[in-house]
Image (cartoon, rainbow, N blue to C red):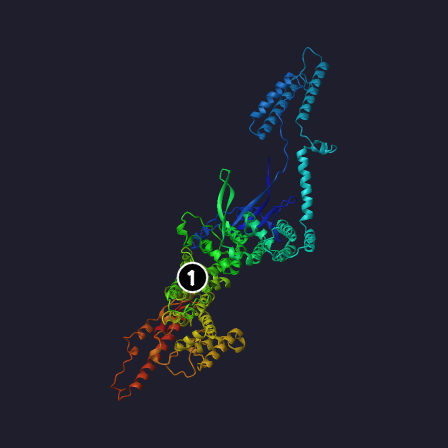
Amino acid sequence: YKYKLVGVTVHTGSAEAGHYYSYIKDRKTGDWNEFNDSWIKPFDPKDMDKECFGGKKPGNSSNSWSSDWGDNQERIKNGYILVYERPAFLKPEHNVVPTTTTTTATATTTTRTEEKKQEPTQKKQDEGDNKDASLEEAKMQDKGKTKSGNNLGVRVDPGLSVDESSLNFINREKKKEEKKEEEEKKEALVNVLDFTDIDPVKIMAQEIKTDIVNNNIEFMRDRQVFNPAYFKFVFDVVRVAPVPPFKEYDDTGKENIGLSVIQLATKVCFQYIARTADKQVIFNKFVAYLKWLFENNVPACKWLLYSLSEKRKLVSDYMLKTREVPVMRGFGELLVHAFKTLKPFEEQSLDKVETITRTVKTKKGEDKKVEEEVGVTATTRMVETLIALIELAPKYWFRFSYFFNVFRDFAILGPLQRTLLVRRHLIEKLGDLYLGNRSPYAKDTPNKQYQQMGSRMYPPKFDSLVQTLSLLICSCHTPSTRTRLTAIRQQKELTDNERKELIKFPQTSILYKNANNEDDLLEMSSKDEKLPHAKEFYLEMISQAHRSKDILHALSDIMCHWSFEDAKYSDDVVRIIIDGIDSSGPEFVITYLHIMEHFIGINDSYQNHRLEQLHGKDVGVLSAITTYRLHHQPFSFTCMRHVIEIMLKNETYRNFMLQKRNEWKWWDSWLDSYINRRYGSTSDVSPDKKKLFDAYLQLLTSNNIEPIRNVQREEPKHLGGEGGYSMYDTRVPSSFPEDHEPGQTDDIYESDEEAPTRLNAGQQGVTGPQGHGTRHQGDALEAVQSSEHPLAREEVPEHGPAGNGKNKDCKKMFKFLRNIVSHTLSMYVHIRYAHTNNLDGETDANLDDV
């Protein structure tokens, strides 16, 4: 049969994400159109290869640098489903041997049948038949012309008259036509329309009839059952059913008439309503009512958890595999609600186990009985079922956040619940899933294949997983807290009150009361301890903390918990913060500053050590702000704003920063220029920035510090004028105070000895945040700053023109002269940089004469 293409469904995108649309041919006009959501437009089938064939893009014949890149590009549009149409129905041939014809006819038919079998294709057979018919007709015509002018073209037998010959010819032709009609009747197709007057039931097989009837009944039933109106009716029936409260744990031998109603309502909700298309409103109402029912019936909660723990596939369907968010959320909330209801009855027995015998299927399909230990309580069995499903979670990464919400909410219930999770090695299991092949446990299982989760466009949501890890890690001892607590408890001469005063835990600790009614933390296994010591764990969390506040808070809690009284771990965290601040832009640096805010708030013996490391002269927060203040003003302002907010909230940090006032004195004038004069008028200033600057001034005033403000000055025309680049314009804020003296540097220091030799970021040749820094031509400045240069020396001759005991005046003169030269060279660097990077790309050759 012949088929013609009439439609193509196209997928554009990748295996992780994409979009579907179609090209369809009009049956009447033959025109092609593109149907893409609500957009319909004509389509030229000549472009079918470009739009539907995928593959690589054709190479570019040009010699440009982009040609190689274009050759390697994959086309993201691929035909996904092809729709064909058969233009005509060709009659099939039936090789039936007739039984009522003569021997000659039978032989002829058999011969023809064999010939047909030998023919390879229908096309060759048709061509052969047409050719034979043409030759036969030509022969008949030739014979007719050669015999005595007979108009009928009949061969005349010399022994017969003309009338007899004509009659014989007519009889032969009639027999041929009858034979032909008889063959056509036997080879004709059965027309179904001929049976329209017959009852189809009489000729239909009983099995087919039964299937059709059952399918119609099922269709009509589903049409009536899976209907919002019907489910509303069921919901009303359930609500009026008598369900008295039953608060006892054991209902053996007692009448619990509400249990059957709850069981029926639960099955209707998740077996029927959950599979309905239009279920949003009625499903949420059902779940809310089920929560109330389970809250008032403790045995119903036991029934729910026990039955679901035996149906692992059902739990995975509702928590991982389904694509319906309301179903996943509602099912998880119902589980947590059952955990809460059973908490006062089962939490003391969560660790108890019993041995049961299960029947499992082997690979050969045989039944095998195995013994295993399971929890005694319904809560423990359900948690074990959920933990066993963790290995399936990576496959359904797009929707597993609601699955891990159950673990997080269960851990929040109390210390005994967290103890159960820790003893079931949940830290190891979640950490291994979270880091994948970069997990510290990957070395223990070299043959394990890790599922790739997410993509750059659609990253997986690990918020609830990381929150669960944070809850469990902060509930356990760190190496430092364990050692410290053991040492204190061994001092028998201490009284109970003295021991309580010495025992200190991190502020992030989630404590519980031990058997001696003392505050304590859980014990973490050696395998679980590998995760908090893995650097990849923190780098992964930081990369996701940029877009998730929940992960950011969880990360900060873990770092603060493990840094308590641990110098080595604290040093590692300091390096992570400093490296992150130095390599981030204004958008991402907030993450590291938020971590620093919690990190410096740890109240232990190493608190001052952490502050000094984070605010060093050469490296640290203050150094980064100072380095990038000219060429990366948004970055410096973001860091300043967060540091000021920390000073306003944390008294310890405020006192520490006031001791380092000389290192951030220049903030006063810089912030004044950046906030108040950057926009030309005070009305254009952002309210948040204005509020921050007012709070900053209030902070200084409350600590008896006089703010240093800028002085308005006229723009030097030779430095830029209108549209030119000026060292003092709003793009590079001036930092000269009101009491500025000629030759004074823009960094404000109490004495010249305290002033650093750096004049700006360009002189150091540093690279700014995220590679935005620039290197200036600072050779001349380095020469001035060199200790061998006369202007850089502090020694002043005692004799000569500056002698007569006036060494102080002479020293001031040298400082004054040195500062003038420094500023002149700094202006030269900025002018040269501006001219070097102008639009024309030309450099003024006379700049070296400035």
Identify whether 395 is placed above or below 208.
Answer: below
Q: Position of residue 3 (x, y in %)?
A: 59, 38
In the image shown, does 268 or 136 lie closer to the viewer? 268
User: Does residue 134 appear in this view?
Assistant: yes
Q: Amino acid at mark 1?
A: His
Location of residue 139 by image quarter: top right
The image quadrant that residue 657 belongs to is: bottom left
Q: Is residue 151 visible in the rendered structure shown here?
A: no
Name the residue at 30% across, 77% down.
Answer: 792
When the figure is inspected, residue 820 is found, relative to residue 553, above or below; the finding is below
Percent x, y for residue 41? 61, 52
Compared across the picture, whether 603 is left or right of 95 comes to: left
Q: Position of residue 524 (x, y in %)?
A: 43, 58
Q: Position of residue 144 (x, y in %)?
A: 66, 19
**Does dot 1 land on a helix, a strand or a loop?**
loop
Q: Front-most of 503 and 810?
A: 503
Few, some or many C-alpha atoms within 10 Å of disc 1 (few <14, some 14-19, many ≥20)?
many
Residue most extreme to the right: 197
Q: Which residue is under mark 1?
A: 477
Q: Split into 4 quadrants, where in the image is the C terminus?
A: bottom left
Query: Please, is residue 631 above or below residue 409 in the view?
Result: below
